[in-house]
């Protein structure tokens, strides 16, 4: 192909954002994942309101969701009205490049609100300052109307309203899924985090009020899915706040934040806390032989730090890359290490009951680790067989050890049972980003077992190795772990057994939103002109009505019955996934005990009481 002057293109204004949306807001999903771009748009607008609160201007934010339209009203200082158009439409324009108006803010690069503007079909902003309102309206990043200053009785602050766009104005634009929709629970979780990190702030979302008095203590109390072994420890210092406890769950669970931003992929601050917490505990007990992994097993912790001019690894700000707390401050490692080392040691000395409970937990973890040491070595050697393109794992082509890979978020692994099902998925998957793990028969019921089962059971041992999660989630090789089973009783049973395995030994996978259920169609309804795939009975009835006359119906009993050509429809761009969530109110311990525990008579009675009888059909 010719390469001439005509190939050199300069993208003006916000055009670059619409052409390369992913680099500004991450995933352009349909709203079924909490990290989809539509929620990043909400966050970018609310972040500005949070920064106003953190500068002690306005303690109330109102967020309203009406279908696909979101509005955010704060009561801060209001955007300076003479520069209102520039502030929301010209990249690299903002009030956070020096520390005079904002200190230790989330938004730093003059990009966030501009990206929202560019990626919205309609975008409106009003600034209220000293009895005057200035309003401007945009469509797809282009100014359509600028209103003159008018008198107003509104309190000072800013109002932003936007609707994420789905209609391309140019073939190369990347916009949102046409079928996207907001899920209120994802926005509620975001709002809760804002309040936990900003005690004294009130956020009203669709009429529901959120606030927090005790910061990270409230956060752990709300999100912890297992009973704490000792009361949550909550320590607040200058520019740092931590909270922690231990539970009887496996693994480690962290919630980390920088300047109020939830860094879901951690970063230098989370790594420093993880390292220095374990060292402080080890030094307190003065036990040189104590393993750091035993100290952290079952740990649930939260850390929030305030960093001047933070450096994140992407515009979406989900991982901190800063090495220093500020231009003239200590390193992140030293700042957190000094604080955690001193405060954790002081707390354990002043609270011997907590120290005793913590020691018992660490010793129990050590005992279990040593008990399974004999089987782990052989199990690890066996797990090395789980390599590229063998019978258990059909891996994808991308290697994920580089955490900075721009394809990491696109990776997934299907866990399925049976040669026919795994064969269909393998034949139609995207081999670059989608892997397939084949189960052999039904997995073992892992409820009530120790982690020794993971190494002794070949299926679980191989799966753990394929996911690379033996030592925690840092090495997780796939962003989505998708349970793909038949839509029948056996398929549901396998699904429950796999969920039990993850809940029992790797609950953080579910908490971090990595586990999904694949939806596959129950019916195919077609006539001579059209084919419809139906996932529910309601969809089947609608298809029968709309595809008259004489539609042909096929009931899919298993994944293996779906041809590879058809399967491509269900695991490609139109893939339907249900994200598995884990919340405190789920009472997962009681659920697992009843449905998967050793209480057969109770469960049999439950089944008989709820059995659908002939008259119900």
Image (spheres, rainbow, N blue to C red):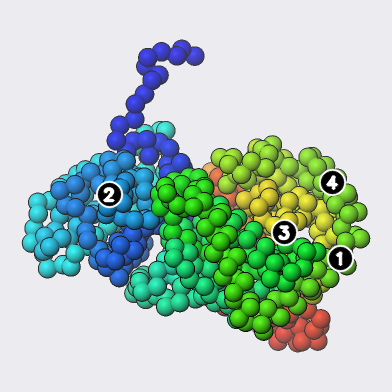
The tag earlier along the polypeptide, 4 or 3, is 4
Rendered position, 346 above or below 168: below
Residue at 90%, 60% in the rendered image: 375
| Distance (Cα) linking label 2 and label 4 | 53 Å
Q: Which residue is mark 3?
A: 486
Q: Which element is circle 1 on? A: helix
Q: Which element is circle 2 on? A: loop
Q: Which element is circle 4 on? A: loop
Q: Residues within 10 Å of mark 4 (few under 14, many from 20)?
A: few
Q: Residues within 10 Å of mark 1 (few under 14, many from 20)?
A: few
Q: Which mark is residue 384?
A: 4
Residue at 64%, 41% in the rendered image: 402
Q: x%, y% of residue 308? A: 40, 52
Q: As rendered, which of 182 and 534 lies closer to the eye? A: 182
Q: Are marks 1 and 4 in contact (CB under 8 Å)?
A: no
Residue at 71%, 66% in the rendered image: 282
Q: Which residue is mark 2?
A: 95
Q: x%, y% of residue 371? A: 88, 67
Q: Residues within 10 Å of mark 2 (few under 14, many from 20)?
A: some
Q: Is residue 502 visible?
A: no
The tag earlier along the polypeptide, 1 or 4, is 1
């Amino acid at each position: 192909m010719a390469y001439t002057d005509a190939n050199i293109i300069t993208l003006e204004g916000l055009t670059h954002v619409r052409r390369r949306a992913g680099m500004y807001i991450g995933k352009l999903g349909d709203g079924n994942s909490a990290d989809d771009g539509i929620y990043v748009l909400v966050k970018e607008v609310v972040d500005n309101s949070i920064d106003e609160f953190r500068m002690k201007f306005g303690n109330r934010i109102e967020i309203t969701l009406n279908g696909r339209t979101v509005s955010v009203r704060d009561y801060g200082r209001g955007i300076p009205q003479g520069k209102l158009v520039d502030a929301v439409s010209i990249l690299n324009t903002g009030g956070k490049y020096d520390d005079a108006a904002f200190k230790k803010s989330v938004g730093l690069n003059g990009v966030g609100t501009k990206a929202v503007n560019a990626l919205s079909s309609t975008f409106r902003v009003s600034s209220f300052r000293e009895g005057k309102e200035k309003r401007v309206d945009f469509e797809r990043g282009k100014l359509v109307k600028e209103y003159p200053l008018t008198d107003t009785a509104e309190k000072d602050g800013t109002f932003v309203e936007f609707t994420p766009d789905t209609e391309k104005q140019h073939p190369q634009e990347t916009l949102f899924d046409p079928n996207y929709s907001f899920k209120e629970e994802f926005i509620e979780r975001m709002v809760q985090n804002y309040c936990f990190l900003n005690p004294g702030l009130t956020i009203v979302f669709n009429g529901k009020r959120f606030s927090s008095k005790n910061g990270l203590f409230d956060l752990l109390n709300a999100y912890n899915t297992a009973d704490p072994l000792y009361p949550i420890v909550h320590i607040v210092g200058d520019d740092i706040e931590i909270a922690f406890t231990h539970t009887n769950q496996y693994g480690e669970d962290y919630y980390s934040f920088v300047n109020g931003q939830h860094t879901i992929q951690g970063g230098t601050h989370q790594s420093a806390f993880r390292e220095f917490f374990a060292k402080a505990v080890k030094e307190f007990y003065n036990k040189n032989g104590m393993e750091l992994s035993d100290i952290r097993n079952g740990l649930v912790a939260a850390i929030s730090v305030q960093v001047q001019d933070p450096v994140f690894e992407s515009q979406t700000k989900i991982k901190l890359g800063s090495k220093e707390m500020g231009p003239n401050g200590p390193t992140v490692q030293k700042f957190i290490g000094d604080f955690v080392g001193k405060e954790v040691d002081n707390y354990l000395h002043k609270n011997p009951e907590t120290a005793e409970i913590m020691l018992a937990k660490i010793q129990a973890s050590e005992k279990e680790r040593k008990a399974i040491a004999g089987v782990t070595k052989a199990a690890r050697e066996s797990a090395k067989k789980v390599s590229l393109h063998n019978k258990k794992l059909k891996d994808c082509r991308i290697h994920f050890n580089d955490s900075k890979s721009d394809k990491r978020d696109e990776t997934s692994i299907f866990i399925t049972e049976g040669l026919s099902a795994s064969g269909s998925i393998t034949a139609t998957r995207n081999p670059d980003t989608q892997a397939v793990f084949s189960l052999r028969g039904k997995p073992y019921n892992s409820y009530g077992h120790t982690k020794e089962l993971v190494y002794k059971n070949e299926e679980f041992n191989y799966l753990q190795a394929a996911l690379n999660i033996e030592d925690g989630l840092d090495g997780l090789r796939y962003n989505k772990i998708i349970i793909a089973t038949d839509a029948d009783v056996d398929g549901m049973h396998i699904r429950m057994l796999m969920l039990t395995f993850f809940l029992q030994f790797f609950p953080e996978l579910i908490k971090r939103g990595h586990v999904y259920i694949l939806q596959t169609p129950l019916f195919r309804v077609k006539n001579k002109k059209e084919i419809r795939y139906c996932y529910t009975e309601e969809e089947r009835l609608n298809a029968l009505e709309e595809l008259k006359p004489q539609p042909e119906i096929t009931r899919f009993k298993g994944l293996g019955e779906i041809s590879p050509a058809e399967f491509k429809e269900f695991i490609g761009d139109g893939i339907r996934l249900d994200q598995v969530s884990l919340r405190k109110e789920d009472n997962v311990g009681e659920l697992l005990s009843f449905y998967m525990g050793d209480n057969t008579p109770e469960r049999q009675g439950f089944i008989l009481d709820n059995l659908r009888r002939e008259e119900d059909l």
